Amino acid sequence: MQYTLKKSLGQHFLHDESICQRIVESLPNDIHNLLEIGPGGGALTKYLIDLPFKNYQCIEIDKEKMDYLFHTYPSLTGKIIHDDFLVAELPFDENFSIIGNFPYNISTQIVFKILDWKEHVDSMVGMFQKEVAERIASKHGNKNYGIMSVITQCYYDIDYLFDVPASSFTPPPKVVSGVIKLTRNNNPYSITDYIKFKSFVKTAFSQRRKTLRNCFKSILPAEKLQGEIFTKRAEQLSVKEFVDLYNSIYP
């Protein structure tokens, strides 16, 4: 049984077996429940189905790929969710981990969905476009540092694991990929209102070339914008400085 490539879904199939194995081996050893996002042709799946997880599920939006997986790996019966991950419900009653070779066109949305599920997702090992992977892992002062860097690092420790060349895929994408690992850090900054904090960070980065004072002057009174920190740009603030600033404005 064959399947077709759907460019509309951002599909690039990983065929380098050594890379597949490295990604799977990067998972933590103590996982009980695992969700694979976008198994596609089963590049990672074939290494996952025989591992001793308590529960394994994969979620696939493409019905043709589902049929292929069922035909090729009969043991997946009952383990494939036909849905769009971005609108899916929680797949397990207990906490779980995530793995995937993520479509470039929705990879940022996938990260924010994981953040919406942060109380339930203990860890993630995923492949992204290298630029996106670097953005997630970037530290302050770097040009890649932005909204996703700050928000993700508030809730997860991030390890940039390795690059994946375009030649590892069929068809080869025009960019290099990168694999990163997220490990939940149990909210060390004690952020109580995730939605409000995320909006605050987005406002800070809304005009990257301008100072924080310019970014916030339309929503905060002048007396709250007098500190020296407001002469800086958002990319100059560490994650802790962002949280401290947020807490000073919204005590």
Image (cartoon, rainbow, N blue to C red):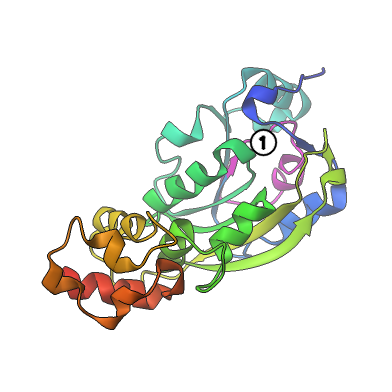
Q: What residue lies at 69% left-to-right and 51% top-to-bottom? A: 51
Q: Quadrant of residue 207?
A: bottom left
Q: Residue at x 23, y 80 (%)?
A: 227
- For the image, the number of numbered tags is 1
Residue 138 place in picture, x, y as percent = 56, 67
- Determine whether, in the image, residue 114 is placed left or right of residue 103: left
User: Measured from the top left, where is residue 74 in percent x and y?
Assistant: 72, 27
Q: Nearer the viewer, residue 101 or 236?
A: 236
Q: Residue 32 at x, y = what percent?
A: 54, 55
Residue 39 magenta? yes
| Tag 1 secondary structure | loop
Q: Is residue 238 magenta?
A: no
| Dominant SS in magenta | loop
- Location of residue 131 with respect to 150 vertically, above or below: above
Q: Quadrant of the N terminus?
A: top right
Q: Quadrant of residue 27?
A: bottom right
Query: Which residue was labeled with disc 1?
Result: 39
Range shown magenta = 36-56
**For residue 167, above or below residue 78:** below
Residue 121 visible here: yes
Please name the amino acid that badge 1 sits on: Pro
Question: In percent of the image, x 24 and y 56: which residue is there?
Answer: 196
